[in-house]
Image (cartoon, helix red, strand yellow):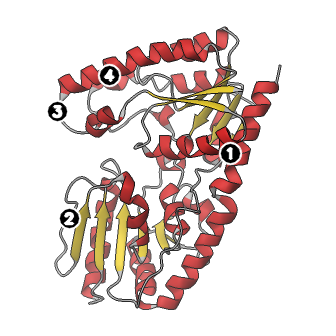
């Protein structure tokens, strides 16, 4: 069986890495010939969200479009076409429509509420070209739809009755607790991206109040690509994200934080940062929003925070009590192994591919 995977980003892109790339070895080991085709290459992805370099971006985009045209021809010889988010980043779903019309079997993977549009996109021209209205069209053209949570499942069921929830997973053989020495200064950490750093800003007052308690904790910020804030009395380390150091950065923390707004966009997210913290046995305090409410069992495998008082109270408890940190960390790890691990979810992906390929 031959399957082509269309994804928007290379392996450096988290959604491509965790929704497609990590499943490929398992699928190949089970007899699936996998062809993985990102639209943006690694060089393009490195500058994609940076300001300037417009000519280089245009050249990289043109190269991606040319490759995608060749991918269309390759797809014609495949048994199944697996589309993560979209086959082409701009415009209507022309490629998806053509493939469906030619009788090709499409599986669509949705892990973000991209049908809402990019509210943060300041370029009106690009904002219109993104065509968020195409998402329900792609869902309707597909033989099967995979979503990352129940909120997106409910949305997708309006356009397609064949929908399965497969939460974004981690390889628990790689994401695992690190052996740590005697407890020193508590390291609280946030690991994210340039686009989500704005949410971390909402915790400035929280960290200021924790600093007033003279806990002497440190704060690590990875992936923000800028200095988010300064807090007197708190040592803050800012680091760029890198694929090779991702797991080590999670393991270096004592407590993880995951602030998010409680809105429609968040409801469509994976809650994956919570899962990553848990996977390495790190207790997490996350906003009481979206999928965090499904992943976290309050006080058992993590904590949910509704407001600043909640954040301060729950972070204080974890800072003060090493035994609580260890207890929550162990329970979080168990949750991920049982519900969000690659070992649990890879067979589900394989079954869907086989079922779609074998269906008439």
Residue at point 23% right, 72% down? 236
Distance (Cα) linking label 1 and label 2: 37 Å
Distance (Cα) linking label 1 and label 4: 32 Å
The picture quadrant where one finds residue 214 is: bottom left
Instruction: Say which quadrant the C terminus sits in.
Output: top right
Residue at point 32% right, 55% down? 241
Return the x and y of residue 252 as percentages of the image width and height.
Answer: 38, 73
Label for residue 165?
Answer: 1
The picture quadrant where one finds residue 73 is: top right
Q: Earlier along the polypeptide chain: callout 4 or callout 2?
A: 4
Q: Is residue 98 left or right of residue 15?
A: right
Distance (Cα) linking label 3 and label 2: 24 Å
Return the x and y of residue 229 as percentages of the image width and height.
Answer: 20, 64
In the image, 167 versus 229, the foreground residue is: 167
Label for residue 355?
Answer: none
Q: Is mark 1 on a helix, strand or loop?
A: strand
Q: In this view, does 316 lie to the left or right of 113?
A: left
Q: Closer to us: mark 4 or mark 3?
A: 4
Residue density around tag 2, few if under 14, some if 14–19, many if 20 or more, within 10 Å = few
Labelled pair 3, 1 in contact (Cβ < 8 Å)? no
Q: Closer to us: mark 1 or mark 2?
A: 1
Distance (Cα) linking label 4 and label 3: 14 Å
Q: Earlier along the polypeptide chain: callout 1 or callout 2?
A: 1
In the image, 171 versus 218, the foreground residue is: 171
Return the x and y of residue 172 as percentages of the image width and height.
Answer: 59, 62
Return the x and y of residue 69 as percentages of the image width and height.
Answer: 46, 13
Q: Earlier along the polypeptide chain: callout 3 or callout 1?
A: 3
Which residue corresponds to mark 3?
A: 52
Which residue corresponds to mark 4?
A: 61
Which residue corresponds to mark 2?
A: 229
Q: In this view, does 245 lie to the left or right of 229?
A: right
Q: What element carries label 2?
A: loop
């Amino acid at each position: 069986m031959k399957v082509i995977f269309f994804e928007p980003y290379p392996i450096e892109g988290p959604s491509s890495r965790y929704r497609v790339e990590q499943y490929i070895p398992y699928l190949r080991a089970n007899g699936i010939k996998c062809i993985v085709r990102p639209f943006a290459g690694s060089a393009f992805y490195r500058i994609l969200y940076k300001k300037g370099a417009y000519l280089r971006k245009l050249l990289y985009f043109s190269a991606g479009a040319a490759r995608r045209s060749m991918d269309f021809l390759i797809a014609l010889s495949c048994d199944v076409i697996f589309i993560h988010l979209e086959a082409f980043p701009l415009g209507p779903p022309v490629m998806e429509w053509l493939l469906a019309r030619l009788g090709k079997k499409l599986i669509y993977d949705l892990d973000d509420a991209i049908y809402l549009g990019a509210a943060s996109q300041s370029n009106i021209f690009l904002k219109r070209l993104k065509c968020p209205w195409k998402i329900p069209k792609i869902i309707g053209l597909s033989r099967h739809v995979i979503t990352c949570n129940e909120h997106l499942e409910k949305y997708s069921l309006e356009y397609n009755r064949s929908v399965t929830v497969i939460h974004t997973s981690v390889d628990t053989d790689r994401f695992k607790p690190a052996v740590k020495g005697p407890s020193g200064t508590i390291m609280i950490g946030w690991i994210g991206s340039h686009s989500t750093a704005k949410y971390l800003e909402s915790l400035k007052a929280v960290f200021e109040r924790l600093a007033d308690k003279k806990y002497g904790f440190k704060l690590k910020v990875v992936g923000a690509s800028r200095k988010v804030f300064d807090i007197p009395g708190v040592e803050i380390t800012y680091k760029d994200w890198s694929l090779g150091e991702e797991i080590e950065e999670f393991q270096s923390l004592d407590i993880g934080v995951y602030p998010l707004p409680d809105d429609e966009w968040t409801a469509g997210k994976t809650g994956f940062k919570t899962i990553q913290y848990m996977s390495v046995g790190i207790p997490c305090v996350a906003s009481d929003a979206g999928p965090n409410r499904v992943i976290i069992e309050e006080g058992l495998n993590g904590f949910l925070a509704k407001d600043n008082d909640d954040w301060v109270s729950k972070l204080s408890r974890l800072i003060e009590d090493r035994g609580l940190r260890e207890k929550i960390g162990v329970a979080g790890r168990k949750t991920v192994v049982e519900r969000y691990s690659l070992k649990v979810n890879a067979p589900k992906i394989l079954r869907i591919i086989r079922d779609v390929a074998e269906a008439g």
